Amino acid sequence: MKKFTDGIFLKILMLICATGILMALLPHNDTQNYSYEQNQPWRYQLLMADFDMEIKRDTASAQKMRDSIDRSFIPIVKRQDDIMEETVGKFVKAISDDASPKVVSELANLLRTVYARGVVDSDIYDKIQSNPRRELRMARSENGADALTSISAVDILSPAKAFEFIDSAYNASGAPLIESKNDEIAHALNAVLVPNVVLDTLADTKLRNQEYLACDASIGVIKKGQRIVDRGEIITPQIYTNLNNYMQKVREKSDDERSSSYFYVGQALYLLTCLVGLYLFMSIYRPRFFHSNKQMLFLLSFITLFVIFAILMFEHITNGIYLVPFAAVPVVIFVFFDSRTAIFSLVVTVMISALLALDAMEFIFLELAAGMAAAFSIKTLSQRSQLLRTALLTFLTYVLAYTTVMLLTNGTLHGFQWRYISMFAINSVILSFVYILILVIEKLFGFTSTVTLVELSDINNPILRKLAEEAPGTFQHSMQVSMLAAEAARSIGANTQLVRTGALYHDIGKLEGPVFFTENQHGVNPHLGLDPEVSAQKIISHVTHGMTLAQKMKLPEMVRSFIPEHHGRGLVRYFYNTAVNENKDPEHPIDKSKFMYPGPNPQTRETAILMLADSVEAASRSLKEYSTQAINDLVDNIVDGKLKEGLLQESPLSFRDIETIKNSFKKRLATIYHARVAYPELKKPETATN
């Protein structure tokens, strides 16, 4: 009871941990994160407004309007009166040593004339020249309030034009100059000539921004329930702006109108529904898997890690969720569990990952179609090359499913994007390398895949070659049992490859002393003269020796289990009966336990099948005739005897399974020992012919 309670507690803990991890990593946003680009088709379903929304100008139109405002905007300036005297003083001081007082006075007066007209920087001067009205604006205070006054800018000069004006006026006056000093005067004038009419930055920026407001003003309204964009529609600049505004409003409403805690609760309930559904399925339909903490830990961990991988791809790559090979889920699960568990695990993984998808229904349809195609394409994964076929079939299914979605939603193939096809191709290529993942899982969890079983069943393996050389009779017996047991396993839907592999290794312990076993004896029986108990221990020891050898070889646990369980807690009956018959001291009966195999009794259908096949094959060698009746009686007696001894009580075989196994044995033995046609003897001499 305590063990059962501990197992349930551990499973609940695993469930809570998986839910917590996924909750921490899933996007915490109750709105869809659409991915869209300007001048590209809208890939999702019809999007309608959930509320009234103002229509703003698109970015290009707004920028064009700003540019127009900038071109027609009349700058606002202010005059700095102190600049003139300051500049004249600097100029006079700079040229007083190079020019006569008369020249200095004349140039100073010209400089004052220029400043009286006004000097502006080159940018403002160019702005004036591009304005037909040739005016500027100046802020003045009237009645305690600021007002703008237009002023004529016809006479205003730039520093370059001011220099030209002074130079032209000075040369026209005919005043004497010191020729060698002209350059110094020009340099001095250039150095001091700065604008005295400058931009009123505060007033200019304020008014310009006021005019910019018109660029961002509403130009219409999208009413609640009105279409924003439909699937396949090209996203024009205006639609792109509408979408951006809509997404921004949705985020604002989400933050303002309700607490995100409700969304978290919904997300947690969704995850728990999916994972609890998996638990219920396993507990009802796959109890032997459910009661194994290791297998449930793997199943839950694999699904959780796969969803985490999907989250990372979604967050870091555009449409990256379609690069995730969800078809690998049923392939991997099928290798270590069965087809129904594989498909149910696929459904759970896809349903959880649908929380990431922008179009959940489309995503679910695509991934379930591809995943099921992959699952159905691998009846038994026994070769790596099968994964290439599965990858190709999965890709074709993706393409067909995507085409179907396009036709259903658009009515045409307009909007068909080859980018998705390339993603499906990459997805399928990744799937073809899932064999590496299977090997990693085998090492981490101690599971055994069908591929590994196939590799172990190769008779060229060193231990099997050694068995064939040193114990040829046992090797032939193992081969016959392997075929007999595999056929029986196939008839009841058990793991055929596991039974076949287990049968090849179940008697490897006989390598320790092959001559003590009948099939390897050639006229000499080493048991003659030995005490029955000693002989029995020689026979029993092949189980313990086999386990030691299997552990040394690092055989998988499920293969090792065939070695002790194929005899279970059965008796070495021949030597037990001999010991009882030869016992002459009735007061000291024979200890039955010394003639019993260590066990345990078969715990799985596969080891139970091997127990029956091993006994039936060995007994069939002693038949005097191989008639149908003799074979049927032999099989019935052997199987019924195992049932009476209680050796099959711990196995999950049903009575129907046992009857099916009996019939399989009978058919197989009848095929092996079928009667052959007797060839007639030649009674007359042969006549030569040409």
Image: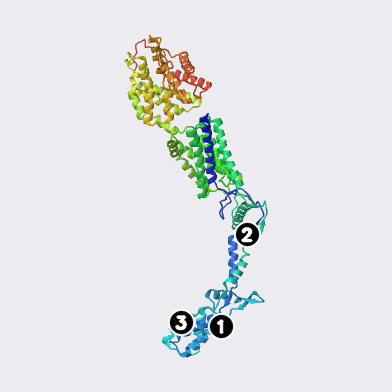
Q: Which residue is mark 1?
A: 116
At mark 1, the secondary structure is helix
In percent of width and height, residue 338 lies at: 50, 32
Density class for disc 3 (Cα within 10 Å; few <14, some 14-19, many ≥20) is some
Within 10 angstroms of label 1, few (less than 14), some, or many (20 or more) residues?
Answer: some
482 or 516: nearer the eye? 516
Q: Is residue 681 left or right of residue 85?
A: left
Badge 3 marks a residue whose secondary structure is helix
> In terms of sequence position, does the residue under pointer 1 or pointer 2 come before the other?
2
Question: How far apart in space, not on screen, are marks 1 and 2 (Cα)?
Answer: 47 Å
Q: Quadrant of residue 139?
A: bottom right
Q: Amino acid at mark 1?
A: Ala
N-term mark: 1 or 3: 1
Mark 2 and mark 1 in contact (Cβ < 8 Å)? no
Say which of marks 1 and 2 sits in front. Answer: 1
Q: How is the image coloured?
A: rainbow
Nearer to the camera, 487 or 212: 212
Residues at marks 1 and 3 touching, judged by CB atoms closer than 8 Å = no
Label 3 or label 2, whichever comes before in sequence order: 2
Residue hosting label 2: 56
Residue 523, by quadrant, is top left
Would residue 175 appear left or right of 148 to someone viewing this image? left
Q: Position of residue 94 (x, y in %)?
A: 45, 84
Q: Amino acid at mark 3?
A: Ala
- Residue shown at 51%/25% (left/top)? 652
612 w.r.t. 377: above or below: above
Depth check, mark 3 against mark 2: the one in front is 3
- Alpha carbon of mark 1 to alpha carbon of mark 3: how far? 20 Å
| Quadrant position of the C terminus in the picture | top left
Image marks 3 and 2: residues in contact by CB distance under 8 Å: no
Q: Secondary structure at mark 2?
A: loop
Q: Which mark is residue 188?
A: 3
